[in-house]
Structure formats: C-alpha cells, structure tokens
Amino acid sequence: MESDLSTCLRQLKTCLDTQQIPQARSIIDRITQLIVEKAEESQAETDFNLECMLTSSNGLVAFLNKSFSSAKLFGKVIESTFELFRKTIEKHSPLMGKRMVVIVPIALRYIQSSSVPARSRELAALVLQDSVAYGCLQNETFAQLVQLPAELLLVFQQGKLPNRFQQNLYELLGQLAQHFPASIPEPHRVRDIFLNAAEKQLLEENYPSLVSLAGAVRGLDLFLVHFAPSENDRELRQRLYLLVKKLSIWEESRSERAVFRNALHVVGNHAPLFSWQLYADHVHWQTMLAGRWIKSSSQEDRDAGLKALYAFHGEIARVLSTPELRAERGPEYPPKVDVLNQYVNYYRKLLSSATVDRLEIRIAIRGFGIMAGPCQQLAGASSISLNELLTIVLQRIEGICERSASSTADMLVYLPDFIQALSEILTHVQQLSTVQLVSVQTMTVALVRDFYHISTAHHELIVRSVVSMLENIGKLGGTTRHQLLDSVLLQGIVWSCTHALPFPTALPVPSSNVAAGDTTPKTDWKRDLVTYKNYLPLWQGLLEKAQSAHDSSLLPALYRALMNTLFVIVEKLDLSTRKRTFQDDDGQQQELFFSDPNIDLLPTKPKDYHIFLNLVELYRDMLHGPQTPAAVRELFADWIRPYFERFVRQSLNRPLVSGFVKLIEMGLATAERIGYFRQQEAPSEDFRTTQMLLAFYLEQTIQRALYATGELQLACLRFVLNAPVRLLVDFIEDKTFKQPLMVDMFRAAFRLGRSLLSIARAALYSLQRIVRFRYPPLRREIRERLLRQVLPLLEPFLRTRDSTLPPAQSLRLAKFKRHRTANVPAVKIERIKQQHRIEQSVDTSELVTFQLRILNFFADLQPNECCWLVVDELELERVHARENKGSSSSLTRWDADSGRSLELRLLCESGTRPCIKLDSIVGRVCELAVECSDRATKLAACELLHTIVLYLLGISYQDQLAGLW
C-alpha cells in the first residue's frame, strides 16, 4: 500500500499545480479507500502510512497549506480532505494523537480565515471536535492546547458568522471547557458569549437562526460541567432558567428540534441549578415533559424528555426532603404535602391504569423510588408511608418473578426500574422485616434467573441498582447482608451453570417443554442456547461496581460469598463414576473393560459434571481471568491456603477429574500475579505449608500428565507448564531420575503440540520463563543440560511450511492492473477484485506466528546455545534408540537393503509401462504423519499412507512381506 499511497500523493501535488479539480477529488477518494476502507493491517504499517499521508512533503497537510490561497477554487477538494481527517480520527484514534501538532494548526488556520468558504470552516471545526471526542487532542499531544480557546475566541470578532459554522464553533468551545477547563482563560467571557448569543436569538421574531441557537445551548450545557454558577449567583441562575424554560415549550411544527432537545439536556444534566425554580413551576414542567415530550413520535425527543423528567422529579423530591422552606422564598411555593400527594397519586394512577404505555409505567416505577425520601421526611402528613411504598414495589416485583417463562418476557422490561426503585427506597428504610427480606431474596434470585432475557441496554442499570441495594442492606447492620449474599449467590451461580456448555462442540441442553407424543425435542434458543457467558455481565459488573461503592466492606463481602459458594457447590456435586456396562445374551448387565478410562468409565450423575464444567469456566472468567480487576484479584491472598488445601485433596481423591486441576491452575496463576510466591524474608507458616503442598501436587500431576490421555492430559500439561518457575526449579535440577521430570514434560508437550499448537505455545512460554528466571538463575550445567535436550524439540516446528499460505499464482493475481480491464467481462473484474480483497485480509497463520515466537525466544539465548537446536547424527541415533527401546529406528520394516521394492506400475496409451518406486518416500510420509506440526500436511500424509496400505493389500504385497510395521 505504501507505493499506492505515495503515487496518490504525487498525483495530488500535480493536480494542485495544474488545478485539476475533479482529478484531485478522485485522488482523495482513493486515499480514503487506502487508509479507511482497506482491510486491517498491522499497527506499524498503519502508523507509517498515516505519517506519509500527513507529514510528508506531498502530504495532505502540505496540500491544505498550498491550496489555502485558492480555497474557493479547491473548495470541494478541501472539504473531502477534512472529511478524510474525520474518518481517519474515528478509525485510528490511538495513532492520531501524535499527529495533532500538524492537524490542529491547519484546522485553526481555516477556522480563523474569513476568506475561506463556510463549509470548509465548518468541517475544520468538526475535525477539532472529533479530535477532542476521540481523545486524540490532549495536553501531551499538543503543547499549545492552553492557547486554543483564546485563538477560537478571536473568530467572534469577525462580525456575522455563518449559522452552521457558529453552531460548530460553540460546540467546540463547550467541548474544550468540559475536557480542558484549565485552558479556558476567561470563563465569564465564554459564558457571556453563549448566553448573549442564545438570548439574542430568542429576541428575534420567529427564531430566525435555530441552528446557531442549538450550538449555543449545547456549548452552554458542556460549559456548565465545570463552570456552573454558585448558590449566591441567583441572577445568573435565573437567566439560565428562563432560557431553558422558554425553549422547553413543545412545538411540534418546528423542523429544527435540536435546540429544544439541547435545552432539555441542560435541565437533565444541571437540574440542581434550578431546584427552587422547578419546584415553583412544577405544573408547567410536569405538563410539558410528561404530557408532551415523552409522547412525541421522535425517539430522540422522547429520550431527552425522559431524562429531563427524571431529573425534574429528583429535584422536586430534594426540595420536599429539606427540613423547611425558607421564609424569604415567598408564598409562591406550594405546600410540600400537597405536592407530594399530587405526584404519588400520579404514579399510582399510571401504575394501575391498563391503557398507559410502557414509558409511563417506567416513570411511575422510578417515581416511587424518587419519592421515598419525601415520604420518610413527611411521614404522617402524606397520603402514603415509606413502608407502603416498599410493599407496593416488592409485590410488583414478586408478581413479575412468579410469572411463567413465556409471559415474563413482556414484564421484564420493567424489572430494571423496579430494582432501581427498590434500591432508592432501601436508602431510607431503617429496618427490614423477615417477610420483606425474603421478598428481596426471591426478587434477586429471579433477577439472576431471567438475566439473559433482559436487554443489554439495561445491564448497567441492573448492576448499579443491585449494588446500591446491597449497600443499603449493609447499613442495617448484623449478618443480614451476609445471609442474603450466601443464599442469592448459591442459587444464582447454580442457575448460571445449568445451561449449555460454552464449548463449540457442546450440544445444547434439551428443553423439557416437549409436547406429549412429540419424539423430536424442540430447541428453545432463549434457553437451550444460553451459556454461563450470558450471566457474566451481571457477575463481573457486581465486582466492578462494588470497587467504587461508598461502603468499602461490600467488595470483601461479595468475594467471601463467591468463594464460599464455590466450596459449597463443589462439595455437594456428585462427581463419582461407574463402569460402562452392556447387556449380555441372558439379559444380565456386564461391565466393559478398556485400558482408556475415558472409554471405560461413565459419570454417575452427568448433570453434576455438566454444572461442574460450567462452574470452573465461570470462576475462571469471573475471578481469575485477564479482565479481573486488580482489587478483586488481591482479595485472593486471604483464601490461598484453604483454596489449595481443599482442591488438592479433591483432585487426589478424584484423579480423573480434570476440573480440579483447572481450579488449582487458576488459583496458582492468581497467586503468582499478586506476588504471593515472591516472599523472601521470614516466610509465614501458611506460606511454607502451601508451597510444600503445591510442590507435592506438582510432582503427582507431572506423573499423571506423562501417562494420561485426552482432556485430563491437556489439563495436567497446562497446569505444570503455567506453574511459577520457583516451583518448577526442583523438577529441573532433580537427580533422582535419569533425566529431570520437566524434560519429559517438555517432550510430551511439544510432541502433542504438533497437533495442538496451544500446548506448544504454553510449553515455549514456560521454557522462556525458565530461561529468564533470575531468583536465583539456573546453574550453568543445569541450564545446558535442559536446553540441549529441549531445543531439538523445536526443530520440527521450524521445518514445517504452513499449507494455508496462498500459492504464488494467486499472489500474481493481486497485481492485476485496472487500466487493462477494457475488454474483460464485469463479472471477471469483480471476481478479481474480490480475490484481491481476500488476499489483503489474510492474517498470519497460527503456525507462522508460533515460528516467529520461537525465533524471538532465541534472542534470550547465547549464540552457542542456539546451536543446540540441531543435534549431530550420532546423538540423534542414540536418542531414537533410547526412545524406541531396542526396536528398529525406522517406522517401516523395509529399507534400501531389504531386497523388496514398493512399485507403482502404470499403463500409458503409447504402450509404455512406467514403474514408479515409492521406497524412498514412504519413510518421510510416515514421519510427517506422526510428527508434522501442520494439521493439513499431517492429514494429507495420513491419507497418502492409507492409500499406499490399500494398494499393498490390493496387489497381495503382504504375501511377500512378513509385516508392514
């Protein structure tokens, strides 16, 4: 692509010199395809292309500078260039930060110039907006950022500006004030620009410029994030309130509705600035928001109205919760009790009505939670008490939870709002009765059960509300929260693990809803194709939100409940096995005997194994995965000894269950990450006991990995290879065996890795960690003995060519020139283009990636150590003799001296009878069939070997040879 991009940039310079406008636009479109629409490339290639496109002498920034004097002539080309900047910032934002030093000055130059077409100035402002929104423009990427607002303020001195340009400029200033408040030199001046522009437009008859007014209101909304007026600045607050109140009036006839939505966004984001004004005019706002805005046919209008309505009701509740209205506020404020009763009755009416839509029901549900504080403050005077509010919400939630699965889906859309309302009510509750606590528990378990039905848009609301509910229950004191967590998590985790296995080859759990007489089980995708991963947003979200909770004891309590739940579930599961049986001729059940336990044994309760497999994977992703927060991972330090003691005992009692090996591997990885094994001075008794236990279990697992098969062998290999080097050193320096156990582990792992590269990657990473280990480093003779025996195992991976690489002929096809397609059918042209796109999108294969990792590993070795990759022939013969234990070193029984020949006789039309002897290739085919690391090559070798065997049987070759193998 580099040559194509350079050619385009040279052609663009030529177009600029010769003023070829159409050709210049087509070149910009071509660059857009190369940079934005092209298939994924490596980050280094993209970075280099962006550097060439922007900063080279023929780059786009140079083009914009040179065409500045002819901006009107090249107006369309300049617009396309700025559009390209916006698309590039959107797609490659991490790489565009260091290019701000050239993009911001050229964009600012166009913004400040009054001789440039208005559309070019608008797009230049949008480029800076996108740079701020996508995080490209920072103090680190542009040193003069503090001067940028002052430069933009100079533009307003030019007099009347185009309306759309004003809108973009106002929004850009608002973004800078929101993200970089320290760069605003005169906040009051910026605020006056926004307010004066908005008020000036409101004084104009028929709102002549709603576009610029929308930009001023939006900029004001962003500006108020850090520069809101203080409590004493009542006059300024009143000006702001009158502005948003006038723009809140519903006028559906207006086509430009962005300005009115922006005004509601000001109310939704900054309602505390207008608390008393909203309370005094609550009838107006209730009528406009609940009666007009949320009933609009536009989704954007409804969303803006709903957000403003929630904020408005929240401020009404905050005013009602104050001890008393101040006397100087005047008699225009209505009595608190009347206002509270009005809104409570409004919510009750909506909730009990059968004709209202879903949005209004949600408003009523949330309203109960919002008014919980006023109900407590005005207890006795209002028409409803806090306990009645709690009872209403709990009854509604129980009604949803007790519905059948088919009828629950329609009501689940209200569950997030009920949960949030419940959490807000619990904020003000002083105590919970036993019945109410059981209702909360039932509701939470039902929430977990039906979580996969709930839209992802509500997941954050659900998690935030549940965390708030747990915080508020924790304030009640005692063991209430611990009991609730233990009960809810036990049922919730079990429910999460009863669904289908997450593996691609796993079949869905058959649904129990099968009609009578129907022998074909029906698959319900909403239940049968659900896995534990559908519940991960809930469990991971709870841990993440608990970190930032005000109650610091919530996260440890949640982690404690999760660990206890794991222990309880594993203890209750029946993981016993029984012999596979068959029915003999007499009808008696007889046991079958196989050497492989994977075939010989069956689980006593398959459902328990199903739950156990899901449980292991769930806890891996939840507590021991790469996405697990550091604060959650640190809590494992208090559980290390009981965790390992429990599961090591379970694993030794049931050595054929690979799940226990995985659990110990997960715990070992987490302990290593938190630095548990790096204790040097005065190790504790628990540390010494745990280290001895793990060393013993490692030795047992190594022995098991060498002789096990299937999934158990893979789990044991991964456990040993991923173990901390401090625990593996003893098995590298062990002299009790003829060779260290770790050498046998590497030999088994790399041999198995020829068919499963993930095991080979784990073995290579383990070897690399051992070589890099420095606490203390391996002795020289131990290191040499290890590398001399292990490095030759990497040679087969380097010798294999990946069979998935595209052939040379298809690479030549990618060089097809577009100007040669005059007489080629359109279908063939499209096929060639499709082939070109496919070749460009081909990623590096798994085997090639592993080969590159091997080469990178050699960088950690000394030059003489790299030579140990290849062993001499005598050493190789000794190794083969030791492995084959006296048997023939060849996989086949024939050789060049056997006097037998494997011939393939053919018959041609000319009468010639060629005879092809296959003796020389059979040995290599057998080697590839056994040792090749490329699966496609290995499969082809096996097929060829099978064909040769069939050919030998067909020509009665076995009569001349005692045996083939």
Image: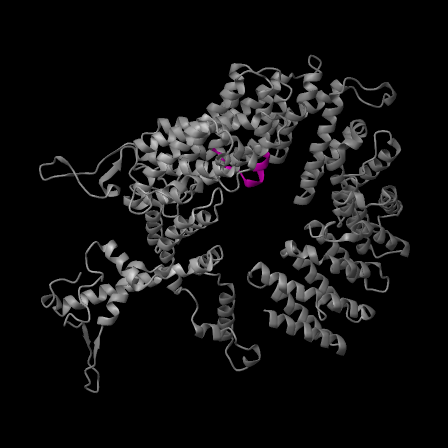
Q: Is residue 249 above or below residue 762?
A: above
Residue positioned 79% across, 47% down in the render: 214
Residue positioned 85% across, 48% down in the render: 206
Q: Is residue 918 above or below residue 425?
A: below
Toward which corner of the image does residue 809 lie, by quadrant? bottom left
Residue 13 appears left or right of 498: right
Q: Position of residue 616 (x, y in %)?
A: 41, 37
- Residue farthest to the bottom? 910
Q: Visible in this render: residue 865?
A: yes
Q: Is residue 290 above or below residue 375?
A: below
Residue positioned 55% across, 62% down in the render: 39
In front of the other: 596 or 815: 596
Toward which corner of the image does residue 629 lie, by quadrant? top right
Chosen colour scheme: one colour
Residue 327 magenta-drawn? no
| The N terminus: image quadrant | bottom right
Q: Position of residue 943 (x, y in %)?
A: 27, 63
Residue positioned 37% across, 60% down in the render: 795
Residue 959 appears left or right of 780: left
Residue 786 appears left or right of 879: right
| The C terminus: image quadrant | bottom left
Residue 557 appears left or right of 335: left
- Residue farthest to the top? 380
Q: Visible in this render: residue 354?
A: no
Q: Main secondary structure of the magenta part?
A: helix
Q: Which residues are magenta?
A: 450-461
- All told, the count of numbered labels is 0
Q: Is residue 104 above or below residue 420?
A: below
In front of the other: 408 or 107: 107
Q: Position of residue 667 (x, y in %)?
A: 44, 35
Q: Position of residue 492 (x, y in %)?
A: 46, 30
In front of the other: 312 or 959: 959
